[in-house]
Amino acid sequence: MDHISSSSYDVYFEHQAQLELKKLTSHNYYSSYFVLVDENTKQYCLEQFEALTSTSFSYICIEISSGEEYKNIDSCKQVWHILTENNADRKSLLINLGGGVLTDLGGFCAATYKRGIDFVNIPTTLLSMVDAAVGGKTGIDFQGLKNHIGVFCNARMTLVMSSFLETLDQRQINNGMAEMIKHGLIYDEPHFYEVIKDLNAFRKLIARSVYVKHRVVTEDPKEGGLRKILNFGHTLGHAIETYMMEERNKETLFHGEAIGIGMILEAYLSFKLNKLLERDLKLITKSILPLYDKVIFKAEDIKEILKLSLHDKKNKKGKVMFVLLEGIGKASYDIEVEKDFILEAFDYYQKV
Ligand SMILES: NC(=O)c1ccc[n+]([C@@H]2O[C@H](COP(=O)([O-])OP(=O)(O)OC[C@H]3O[C@@H](n4cnc5c(N)ncnc54)[C@H](O)[C@@H]3O)[C@@H](O)[C@H]2O)c1
């Protein structure tokens, strides 16, 4: 697969992505071009990016600080300030060259600058390739709440080139693997088995993973129903991620690591409450556990995580709602879960 297309966005892969980038930068489709980087993508990706653009291409570079703690309104102000100072108009283009923090924040800045300018995502982490850079969710964190402020807005196109992954360490690769595993678990059983069969062969499975996300998002762009299944592992995973960032800082978990724990917890809930076979719970646990360091949660940690999970955007009327698996490759959503089962799930994770 070298291309996924829908009425509102396109995703190109590998060689096809290179051709599209060359085309995009050869003609003056836009009045001016801006490229958003952080200090790491400036160091590791900008040169490769430039080598793939047309020789006549000129752009203004905007640099923000890397990391989830900078996915905030101050970084947005920096971006909007530079766009304004350089007279970016509604025909300007913002190219987001980076991981999920940068594509989320850059997308949000572009979607709101002068009521919206085009942006292109060039994801440079595995997590952003298979998840963050596709699907139209943009946004920033606010007052300790993840992705609390944002808009739905699709990138004009997303260009996925796995050569950018060369400079990522194994922890970052495993971070993205969580979302690939999730795509298989919720929608595509053969994909799950392929991903776990050889964790080093992930590159050739990136496009398939994006395709799962694309199928789900196309059916339900604004998360009225089916799209919720993409949140498998995220109800508790997001709360764990936020808690570790806020309360046990310096022990910050990567997004995929928190989602990995969330998927084990929610697979346990699926076994207890939603038809998942014990055999499959064991397989899921065995596939995810070795990818990430085990986190020890004390009773007070779990209490706070439960409180945070109430802030989840998927909840209704103060009840924590879950996406649970019916089996590998099939998920159901809007399932209310009693607190005692959640405590049991933490107990399972702790002891396994
Ligand atoms: N919009 C969505 O649908 C969606 C989906 C999933 C996750 N997200 C968001 O994505 C974010 C996490 O994304 P992430 O895991 O990519 O984190 P990230 O953007 O923080 O990138 C991880 C680190 O790798 C560095 N980096 C990026 N590319 C590199 C490269 N090629 N070589 C070396 N270093 C590189 C970055 O500077 C950063 O330090 C979270 O904020 C999460 O909320 C959004």
Image (tube, rainbow, N blue to C red):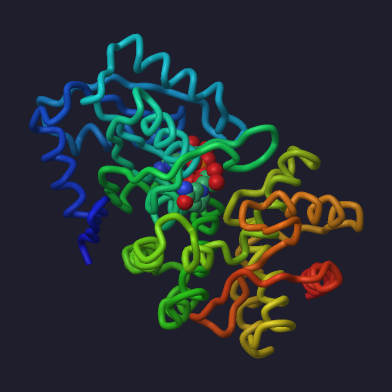
User: Where is residue 208 drawn, in percent x and y?
Assistant: 34, 69
Q: Which residue shows up at 78% across the image and 75% down it?
A: 352
Q: Which of 329 and 321 is in front in this view?
A: 321
Which residue lies most toward the right here? 299
Which residue lies most toward the top here? 85
How many numbered marks, from 0 up?
0
* 303 sits to left or right of 315: right
User: Where is residue 241 drawn, in percent x and y?
Assistant: 68, 49
User: Where is residue 202 drawn, in percent x and y?
Assistant: 40, 66
What is the quadrant of the N terminus in the image?
bottom left
Does the rendering let one see residue 169? no
Which residue lies most toward the front here? 317
Does the rendering let one see residue 150? yes
Q: Which residue shows up at 25% across the image and 29% down it?
A: 93
* 21 sits to left or right of 69: left
Q: Nearer the viewer, residue 126 or 314?
A: 314
Residue 4 sits in which quadrant?
Answer: bottom left
Q: In this view, does 265 lie above or below 292?
A: below
Q: In this view, does 11 lie above or below 265?
A: above
User: Where is residue 104 drawn, in percent x and y?
Assistant: 46, 40
Residue 349 sits in which quadrant?
Answer: bottom right
Q: Which residue shows up at 48% across the image and 24% down it?
A: 76
Q: Which residue shows up at 63% across the image and 33% down it?
A: 142
Q: Is residue 188 above or below residue 221?
A: below
